[in-house]
Image (spheres, rainbow, N blue to C red):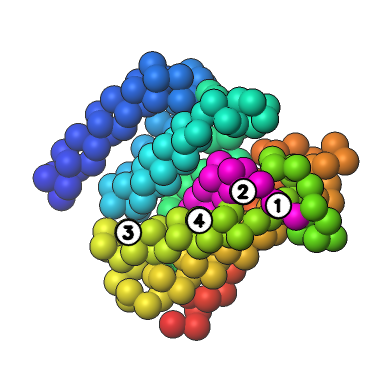
């Protein structure tokens, strides 16, 4: 017990270091880094460091995807740059909640994986999919400009599925979910569904100014978590 307690505090120290690095590298602002640290501590002591590592994997992939083809994104006006606490909360609070109660309700493991898979799929689809020159609006299939809210493309969809699958594989390897098939199915299906819901909400509401990007991301991760919980009940 004491050994586990000490190990958890060692991870907390590493978490503070990660927060400092993301702030200094201008990936997150000060409050964004602080919120990330707080949510990480909750996850470490409620679910375990292996659950935290899964979120860190999402963070790393999202930051790398954001930096990818930076000049081109800047020319389109689609480079986000430093993310704020709103971004951290909208993408991570659902997963944090699922982790906090995952030890009490086993199906919340599916919710945790589903929420992270959705956040990963959506981020990669947005950051890499913008490179596709022929996106279409998900609600009408009308050709639109790259970066339009609600736009989908073959490249974006493919990278979203790959990102979700990586989360599923990692969830199994980290011991978050011990059934490999369940981990993959929950991650890929939840992530893909959540990503498409994000696009639908973006097309219907964000484009009209009725929702912000953070609102859309939060609702999408909630949807991904619910799908994950449903699918986990099937295994």
Q: Secondary structure at mark 2?
A: loop
From the top left corner, tell me how far across and down residue 213 is, in percent: 70, 39
Of the pair 103 and 120, the residue shown nearer to us: 120
Residue 107 to residue 70: above or below: below
From the top left corner, tell me how far across and down residue 99 is, in percent: 43, 53
Q: Which residue is mark 1?
A: 135
From the top left corner, tell me how far across and down residue 157 is, in percent: 58, 59
Residue drawn at (46%, 74%) of the image: 185
Quadrant for the C terminus, please: bottom left
Which marked residue is nearer to the observer: mark 3 or mark 1?
1
Residue 188 tag number: none
In 3D space, how far apart are the residues under numbered discs 3 and 4 (Cα atoms)? Answer: 16 Å
In 3D space, how far apart are the residues under numbered discs 1 and 2 (Cα atoms)? Answer: 6 Å
Of the pair 190 and 35, the residue shown nearer to us: 190
Give the mark, 3 or 1, whose residue is nearer the N terminus: 1
The quadrant in which residue 156 appears is bottom right
Which marked residue is nearer to the observer: mark 1 or mark 4?
1
Residue 159 tag number: 4
Give the mark, 1 or 4, whose residue is nearer the N terminus: 1
Labelled pair 3, 4 in contact (Cβ < 8 Å): no
Labelled pair 3, 1 in contact (Cβ < 8 Å): no
Residue 82 to residue 87: above or below: above
Give the mark, 4 or 2, whose residue is nearer the N terminus: 2
Residue drawn at (83%, 56%) of the image: 142
Query: Magenta segment, which residues?
Result: 114-136
Q: Which residue is mark 2?
A: 132
In 3D space, how far apart are the residues under numbered discs 3 and 1 (Cα atoms)? Answer: 30 Å
Labelled pair 1, 2 in contact (Cβ < 8 Å): yes
């Amino acid at each position: 017990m004491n050994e586990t307690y000490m190990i958890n505090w060692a991870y907390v120290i590493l978490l503070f270091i990660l927060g400092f690095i993301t702030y200094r590298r201008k990936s997150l602002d000060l409050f964004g880094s602080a919120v990330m640290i707080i949510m990480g501590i909750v996850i470490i002591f409620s679910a375990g460091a292996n659950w935290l590592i899964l979120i860190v994997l999402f963070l790393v992939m999202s930051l790398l995807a954001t930096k990818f083809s930076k000049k081109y994104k800047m020319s389109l006006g689609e480079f986000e740059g430093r993310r704020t606490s709103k971004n951290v909360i909208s993408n991570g609070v659902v997963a944090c909640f699922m982790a906090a109660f995952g030890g009490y309700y086993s199906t919340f493991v599916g919710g945790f994986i589903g929420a992270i898979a959705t956040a990963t799929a959506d981020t990669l689809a947005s950051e890499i999919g913008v490179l596709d020159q022929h996106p279409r609006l998900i609600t009408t299939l009308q050709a639109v400009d790259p970066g339009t809210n609600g736009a989908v493309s073959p490249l974006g969809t493919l990278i979203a599925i790959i990102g979700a699958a990586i989360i599923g594989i990692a969830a199994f390897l980290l011991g978050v979910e011990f059934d490999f098939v369940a981990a993959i199915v929950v991650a890929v299906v939840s992530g893909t569904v959540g990503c498409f819901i994000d696009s639908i909400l973006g097309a219907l509401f964000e484009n009209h100014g009725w929702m912000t990007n953070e609102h859309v991301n939060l609702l999408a991760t909630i949807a991904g978590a619910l799908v994950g919980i449903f699918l986990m009940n099937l295994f």
